[in-house]
Image: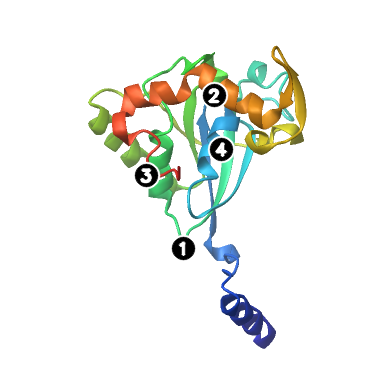
Amino acid sequence: MLRRLAAIAGLLAAGLTAPPSLAATKTAIFAGGCFWCVEADFDKVPGVISTTSGYTGGDTPNPTYDDYSSGGHREAVKIDYDDSRVTYEHLLDVFFHSVDPTDAGGQFCDRGESYSTAIYVLSEAQLQTAKKAKKAAEEELGRPVVTPVLRASTFWPAEDYHQNYYQSEERTFTRFGYVTRAEAYKGYREGCGRDARLREVWGEAALRGIAK
């Protein structure tokens, strides 16, 4: 115990922050279309510890990028966050303002249920909080929000190359030739019209809570 306190004191003296305790680490699961984009957005939210792209909501085990949609899964992101720094309520507010929750057919240029939005709750408290956040989003927009609030099922992490795709310096082949995955992500996000559509839906509140 004394050694642990000494270690924390050393971190503070060095101007560093002690890691969050396990008790303060919570999890949220959101589907918001392309998981590269959701991951990129939530990594910029203060208090988020880590994000993991994956698949959930379907009925087939061990889904892959090639077959997840046929098993009824959505692309989703598991967000581990420090509950002492950011609340689930705030993460929900960030989520709604980073998607088009009025679109039941997918998100932006990506169409189909596998790209549609959803909130997967892990407890009764999350369920009630998510319902309130959905109602608040409807009141702010003045129209129905189609994003369902669902009980979480197994979350299957996506293949390694999908993780932190938006930051990766690995090179990949595209119709424009070989570029880094980070460059491919930037071109995809712009070409898909994600941010432009968010501004149409939310105005100045688009991407609220995400550090620029």
As drawn, 190 above or below 87: above
CA distance separating discs 3 and 1? 20 Å
Label 2 secondary element: helix
Question: According to the image, label 1 marks what residue?
Answer: 84
Q: Position of residue 43 (x, y in %)?
A: 55, 45
Q: Quadrant of residue 70?
A: top right
Mark 3 and mark 1 lie on one chain; the one further toward the N terminus is 1
Q: Nearer the viewer, residue 184 or 165?
A: 184
Which image quarter holds the C terminus? top left
Q: Position of residue 122 (x, y in %)?
A: 51, 45
Question: According to the image, label 2 marks what residue?
Answer: 189
CA distance separating discs 1 and 4? 22 Å
Say which residue appears at 22% left-offset and 26% top-offset.
142
Mark 3 and mark 2 lie on one chain; the one further toward the N terminus is 3
Mark 2 and mark 4 lie on one chain; the one further toward the N terminus is 4
Say which residue appears at 76% left-offset and 33% top-offset.
170
Q: Check disc 1: other Cα within 10 Å, few if <14, some if 14-19, many if 20+.
A: few
Could you tell me the amino acid type at mark 1? Ser
Mark seen at residue 210: none
Q: Is residue 212 rendered to the left or right of residue 179?
A: left
Q: Is residue 134 rendered to the left or right of residue 31?
A: left
The answer to the question of whether label 3 and label 1 lie on touching residues, with beta carbons closer than 8 A, is no
Question: According to the image, label 4 marks what residue?
Answer: 40
